[in-house]
Image (cartoon, grey):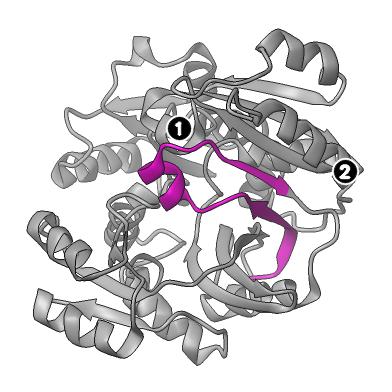
Amino acid sequence: MNVVFLSPHFPAYSLQFCRQLKNAGATVLAIADTPFDQLPPAAREALTEYYRVGDMHNYDALVRALGYFTHAYGKIDRLDSLNEYWLETEARLRDDFNIFGVRGDSIATIRRKSVMKEKFRQAGVPVAAGRVVASEDEARALIAELGYPVVAKPDAGVGALDTFRLDNDTDLSSFFGRKPAVEYIIEAFVGGTIYSFDGLTDRHGNIIFATSHVFSQGIMETVNQGRHISYHSLRELPPELETFGRTCVEAFNVRERFFHIEFFQTAPTRYVALEVNIRPPGGYTTDMFNYACDIDIYRIWAELLVTGRSQFTFERKYHCCYASRKNSIGYRHSHEQILARYGRFIVQTASVPGVFSSALGDIGYIFRSPLMEDIHEITSFIQETMEH
């Protein structure tokens, strides 16, 4: 099987996917704009061949790269980056080279929040009211229906970038005074706890792995307010959340893909859909899959692609948590104190690259326990500030 991977070195977990593709027997071909000798050794070792382009945004250069690979190795069977940023580029390349996967005729459903919102409604999944607005006057008319607060977000944005909570007319005018030149959707602010439904499907759309995470707050608040964040997996999934999650996976026709679907829990058994992402969850969450269940999700994904294997069992043995700290915040307990007290629970510490630090903190601790009380205790200890 010939698999082309865009950006095999970034984010860092990409090289794990490439390495397992090679182990599964794939011919692993990669495209990026980084000189080959500057790729991490593990990425270089995983690749059959590497094609460097001057600019990953130059579509013609990507077409030439795929043309070269097709001439040298035969038909390309799969193309991916597992990165939301490249979803539209991937779909266009799959169209042009007739490659299995998400194609151009369905990309809007998983990229444009307005189209996504309509798909949720059609599937019977509750969603926040809102629509795309083209001007401040249109926004005011919508807010007259919804009331403040509202959230303004790019209709085709990535994560929580350029997303804002607006609490009054002053915030609204200020937002339109600096609004990026892209389409924006405004929707009612939904208060509640963010839950995710995460997993992987086989090529027929059957879910072969699923889990859920609970977040201390949204990425929008984390980034815009300079806060640290924590989130942890659940050993047992709330039945209502799992039902909505599975409904969404079917409605969005998720095939041979990871998924990360976000909901607000507004009451113990009530959920409102936020958005669907047809990619692995960000940060270190794929590692957390592994720690929580003692599996290798990278190998499972690679074997799914190469061999079609979809029979696989797993058990959520632990709650796995990520808790971040920011250099700008004074914490009561030192790194050494954390390790001394809770080292037996900690499975990984991460120094977060600067491009991700606004969302994931400057350092992250990943730890696990079968008991939720341990998770809460360790998180509180890690994130306790000098002000308390």
Whole-percent x and y of residue 64? 20, 40
Residue 194 location (% of width, % of height): 59, 60
Magenta stretch holds residue 253: no
Which residue occupies the foreground of this view, 294 or 144? 144
Between residue 302 and residue 167, name the one nearer to us.
Answer: 167
Amino acid type indicated by mark 1: Pro
Q: Quadrant of the N terminus?
A: top right
Q: Nearer the viewer, residue 152 or 273?
A: 152
Q: Residue at 55%, 52% (x, y): give it.
A: 217
First in sequence: mark 2 or mark 1?
1
In the rendered structure, which segment of residues is drawn in magenta? 205-232
Q: In terms of secondary structure, where does tag 1 sit?
A: loop
Q: Secondary structure at mark 2?
A: helix
Q: Nearer the viewer, mark 2 or mark 1?
A: 2
> In whole angstroms, how far apart are the C-alphas of marks 2 and 1?
32 Å
Q: Is residue 105 above or below residue 371?
A: below
Whether residue 296 is visible here, answered yes or no, is no
Q: Counting other residues with Cα less than 10 Å from the Cα at mark 2, is it few (<14), some (14-19), or many (20 or more)?
A: few
Q: Residue at x 48, y 38 (%)?
A: 227
Q: Quadrant of residue 207?
A: bottom right
Q: Position of residue 359 (x, y in %)?
A: 45, 39
- Is residue 375 shown above or below 204? above
Q: Is residue 243 left or right of residue 8?
A: right
Q: Position of residue 361 (x, y in %)?
A: 50, 30
Q: Which residue is mark 1?
A: 11
For residue 106, say whether it is visible: yes
- Please state if 231 lies on the left or on the right of 39 as rendered: right
The residue under label 2 is 373
Tell me where residue 339 sits by quadrant. top right
**Which part of the image, by quadrant, shows the C terminus?**
top right
What amino acid is found at the position of numbered circle 2 in the picture?
Answer: Glu
The numbered dot on residue 376 is: none
